[in-house]
């Protein structure tokens, strides 16, 4: 490994169903929290869906409005489904529901042996969810505008714990899995217990 080479950032993929509501909200909120923590250059955040039903669509207008109302910048967005091999490019895949987590693990199995992102639930990092059996982030799509406020609140709560987790991951031995070896290192990201 070239010691003078710039280290690769830790890469996070946020995943929901269609990639127009929950996962882009998570992407925007987590990116902002990381910037506030001075970690914007250390962690890259993207989002995707488990379905291609919304392929190419922008973030839902209600999600955009609620994010903007709370002061978040909402970048251009084009929904896409997690592609074959895509998980290998990430260190951590954050599923919005247990169903999404199952789909991501199936995708990793279909991709075959080799490096793949560690799959975790977004709300595993939400201290307010301690003791809850259901760790799914609520889907606001079928409800009214108010549901997007509820989803944002849950996403923000999980983002706080995620920043702490990512800070620990980056501090681990002064390096993280992408930095630990040469490009293409196939070791899996370390498994750590959920923060409760």
Image (cartoon, rainbow, N blue to C red):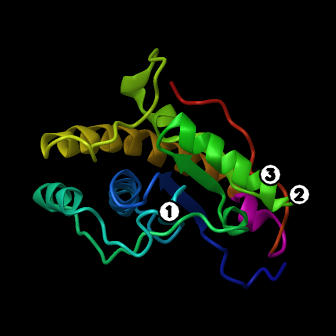
Alpha carbon distance from label 2 to label 1: 22 Å
Secondary structure type for disc 1: strand
Residue under label 2: 113
Q: Which stretch is magenta?
A: 175-183
One can see residue 123 in this view = yes
Q: Which residue is mark 3?
A: 109
Label located before the other in sequence (2 or 1): 1
Confirm whether the magenta stretch covers residue 123. Answer: no
Spatial separation of the CA atoms under disc 3 and disc 1? 18 Å
Q: Which residue is mark 1?
A: 48
Q: Residues within 10 Å of mark 1 (few under 14, many from 20)?
A: many
Query: Local crowd at mark 3 within 10 Å, few (<14), some, or many (≥20)?
Result: few
Residue 34 picture quarter: bottom left
Q: Is residue 10 above or below residue 172?
A: below
Residue at position x 65%, y 30% from top?
193
Q: Is residue 46 left or right of residue 69?
A: right
Q: Position of residue 65 (x, y in %)?
A: 14, 60
Residue 90: percent from the left, percent from the top? 65, 63
Between 138 and 73, which is closer to the camera in this rendering? 138
The structure residue drawn at horizontal position 54% and vertical position 55%, both measured from the top left corner, is 50
The reply to whether the magenta stretch includes residue 178 is yes
Which residue occupies the foreground of this view, 78 or 43? 78
Is 70 left or right of 31, judged from the image as shown? left
User: Residue 113 sits in which quadrant?
Assistant: bottom right
Q: Left or right of 114: which side holds 28?
A: left
Asked whether the residues under the numbered discs 2 and 3 touch, taking CB atoms below 8 Å apart as contact, a structural biologist would say no
Helix, strand or loop at label 3? It is helix
* Badge nearest the viewer, 2 or 3: 3
Q: Is residue 189 above or below residue 28?
A: above
Q: Looking at this rendering, what residue extends furthest in the front direction?
A: 53
Q: Quadrant of the N terminus?
A: bottom right
């Amino acid at each position: 490994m070239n010691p003078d080479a710039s280290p690769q950032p830790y890469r996070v993929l946020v995943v929901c169903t269609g990639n127009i509501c929950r996962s882009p909200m998570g992407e925007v909120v987590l990116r902002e929290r990381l910037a506030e923590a001075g970690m914007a250059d250390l962690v890259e955040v993207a989002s995707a869906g488990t379905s291609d039903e919304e392929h190419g669509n922008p973030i839902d207008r209600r999600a955009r409005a609620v994010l903007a109302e709370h002061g978040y910048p909402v970048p251009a967005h084009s929904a896409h489904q997690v592609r074959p091999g895509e998980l290998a490019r990430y260190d951590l895949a954050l599923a919005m529901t247990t169903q999404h987590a199952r789909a991501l693990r199936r995708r990793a199995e279909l991709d075959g042996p080799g490096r793949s992102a560690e799959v975790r639930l977004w709300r595993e990092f939400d201290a307010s969810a301690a003791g809850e059996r259901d760790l799914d982030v609520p889907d606001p799509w079928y409800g009214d505008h108010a549901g997007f406020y509820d989803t944002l609140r849950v996403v923000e709560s999980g983002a706080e714990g995620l920043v702490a987790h990512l800070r620990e991951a980056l501090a681990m031995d002064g390096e993280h899995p992408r930095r630990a070896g040469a490009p293409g290192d196939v070791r899996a990201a370390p498994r750590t217990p959920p923060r409760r």
